[in-house]
Amino acid sequence: MTAADDPIALLPHRPPFRFVDAIGVLVPGERVEASYTVRGDEPFLAGHFPGNPIFPGVLQLEALAQAGAVAVLSDPRYAGKLPLFGGVEGVRFRRIVRPGDELVLHVELERLSARGGWGAGVASVGTEETCRARLLFALAPAPAG
């Protein structure tokens, strides 16, 4: 299977630290709509919080960043690069995400260059926004090996 068949394969992330299950819309170098379903068996949920599992806000940001990375890495100009967090701005958490929720991830790339760029991300469950942020990323050379 090629990356054209499965754009998620472009991500350098692997379970248990991959937070993209499916791609709905992909315009390489421009935008992506992806999703991640919180299963409930993720190890960190046992401690966040015992008896009241909540998908952490910082992992919502990570999920948005991973979705955005699919949009970047699917552009042939950036194939094989390693996208890394450079920063976040304007972060707002608006709704709790729990096991069984499907987190829908929308990322629009605002600026993209050989060194990195910016993307605007919104995560939601159903019609309710859970998180929004502006994401700064750097593009590192492809890892050796």
Image: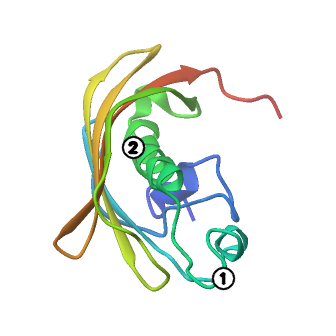
Name the residue located 51 percent from the left edge and 71 percent from the top edge: 54
Please tell me which residue lies in front, 5 or 144.
144
Above or below: residue 87 compared with residue 131: above
Residue with the mark numbered 2: 68
Q: Kindly indicate the quadrant of the structure image that contains residue 39.
A: bottom right
Q: Are marks 1 and 2 in contact (CB under 8 Å)?
A: no
Res. 106 mark: none
Q: Is residue 33 above or below residue 43?
A: above
Residue type for callout 1: Asp
Residue 7: % across, % down: 46, 56
In this rendering, position of residue 31 left or right of residue 13: left
Q: Which mark lies nearer to you, 1 or 2?
A: 1
Q: Residues within 10 Å of mark 2 (few under 14, many from 20)?
A: many
- Please indicate, yes or no, whether residue 28 appears anywhere in the rendered image: no
Residue type (three-letter) at the residue carrying disc 2: Gly
Image spot of residue 59 (x, y percent): 53, 54
Give the camera-side residue of 17 and 79: 17
Q: Which residue is mark 1?
A: 41
- Residue 81 vs residue 93: left or right? right
At horizontal 45% and vertical 47% (from top left) the residue drawn is 61
Q: Residue at x 73, y 72 (%)?
A: 43
Q: What is the crowding at mark 1: few (fewer than 14 residues within 10 Å), some, or many (at least 20)? A: few
Query: How far apart are the alpha carbons under marks 1 and 2?
Result: 25 Å
Tally the numbered discs: 2
Q: Position of residue 6 (x, y in %)?
A: 48, 63
Q: Secondary structure at mark 1?
A: loop
| Quadrant, the C terminus | top right
Counting residues from the start of the chain, the first of labels 1 and 2 encountered is: 1
Q: Which of 18/30 is in front?
A: 18
Q: Residue at x 79, y 28 (%)?
A: 144
